[in-house]
Image: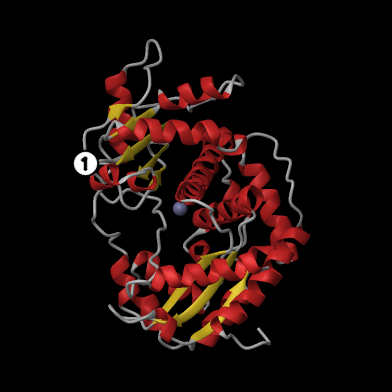
Amino acid sequence: MKRIVICIAACLVAMTGCGQKKKSRKDILHAPDQLLVQTPLNLAGISPSERDDAKFNRCIAGNGNPEALAGCNLPYLELQETTREEQVAQVMSHTLISHDWQTERFRSFLLQTRPELVSMLSCVKGIAISTDIRPSFYYPPSGAIYLDARYFAANEEEAKTVSTRPDAREENYDQINLLFFSVDTAMPETIEDARRLDLEGLLAHELAHACDFKAAALTGQYLSAALPEAPHNAVYYLAQWLFFGDANAKDQLATYTPAEIGRSYEESPIVDIYGYGNQFEHLAMIVQNHLAFEFDGNNRVDLLTDNPKENENLRDFPIHWGMTGKFCQPQLFEEGRAITARTVPMPFAFQKTIADCTSIVHEAGTAVHQVLGLPESR
Ligand SMILES: [Zn+2]
């Protein structure tokens, strides 16, 4: 209980430390540029025998034009059921990097992460890590994931090589009067732990896309096709503006009050604001949330407040609406868990129960009341 209060207080302090708003770190599903990666990349591991490495590099990091990739026909990274060390060597032989330090960071992460996450790597054809990728993305025509190297940087020297260019969509956040943000309830004990949680979340999300598209390539049916469609309500317009810059959605959004936006979020079957983007993002957010809950007992608090300008302190602004653990609602929880189990290639023996989920929701809800002074009825 106390732990969650401290955590939420710490998160709020951290995000308001320098008048900074908490910005979205969501991915995109398609590459924005002609070139998938601007920086020349090198193989992180040992090349598999008889592979044409130049072709592999071109098909993963080269031209972003789907037609240019049509002749690639690279195989999926089918992981053998051997030791973790051998699996990691296999992954590294399909990983391209922009800087040498990324090899050891990725390798050591893979050696200690959960087997379910490792099994999801069998859904990609390659992995690219580069200091100029922002935001991270999965690109269906290449079947590869493209990861922002800042998730891997562990010291100042490494961080210095990473691009400082902001995610282009941050401008969308600044152009509206409301700020929708989420606070994690899991409290990492160390900086290394915090980096691991971030990287697990990123990989769970991008690999969920990869497994969704691999299922469609093999069966003609996306896993995400089974999910409900997002209703075109107030929070839908908010998401379409924030993540896609849809000006019409921004106009629509202006006709709703914060309470109406919050209520539409509570009432719909979509578990995360990013899930309103499209069916693919909805699946990726379900899987990301369920794995973070199962692996680290994480839940989320979603909040809606006024949008601070530069040098204004978020703590001075009223919280218009808040909600804990959307994905814990009984029906959403069961459905989300079922589709997560279908997305993860290896059999998934879930250890946590919905009662665990609900108890975090209860504690986080009470903590939010205490820290932010939300009305008791919420
Ligand atoms: Zn995504």
The structure's colour scheme is: secondary structure
Identity of the residue drawn at 61% across and 81% down: 369
Residue 125 seen by the camera: no
Q: Please give the residue where the numbered disc 1 appears in the rendered image.
A: 38
Residue 175 lies, with reference to residue 194, above or below; the image says below
| Residue 21 in the figure: left or right of residue 188 | left
| Residue 115 in the figure: left or right of residue 280 | right
Q: Secondary structure beneath disc 1?
A: loop
Identity of the residue drawn at 34% across and 48% down: 150
Residue 129 lies, with reference to residue 150, above or below; the image says above
- Image position, residue 28 (x, y; %): 39, 54
From this viewpoint, which residue is outermost toward the top? 50
Which of 238/289 is in front?
Answer: 289
Q: Quadrant of the C terminus?
A: bottom right
Residue 111 seen by the camera: yes
Q: In the figure, residue 161 lies in which quadrant?
A: top left
The local crowd at label 1, few if under 14, some if 14 to 19, many if 20 or more residues have their Cα within 10 Å, is some
- Image position, residue 7 (x, y; %): 55, 66
- Image position, residue 216 (x, y; %): 54, 40
* Amino acid type, callout 1: Gln
Q: Establish whether ligand 1 lies closer than 8 Å to the Cβ of label 1.
A: no
Q: In the figure, residue 376 lies in which quadrant?
A: bottom right
Q: In the figure, residue 355 lies in which quadrant?
A: bottom right
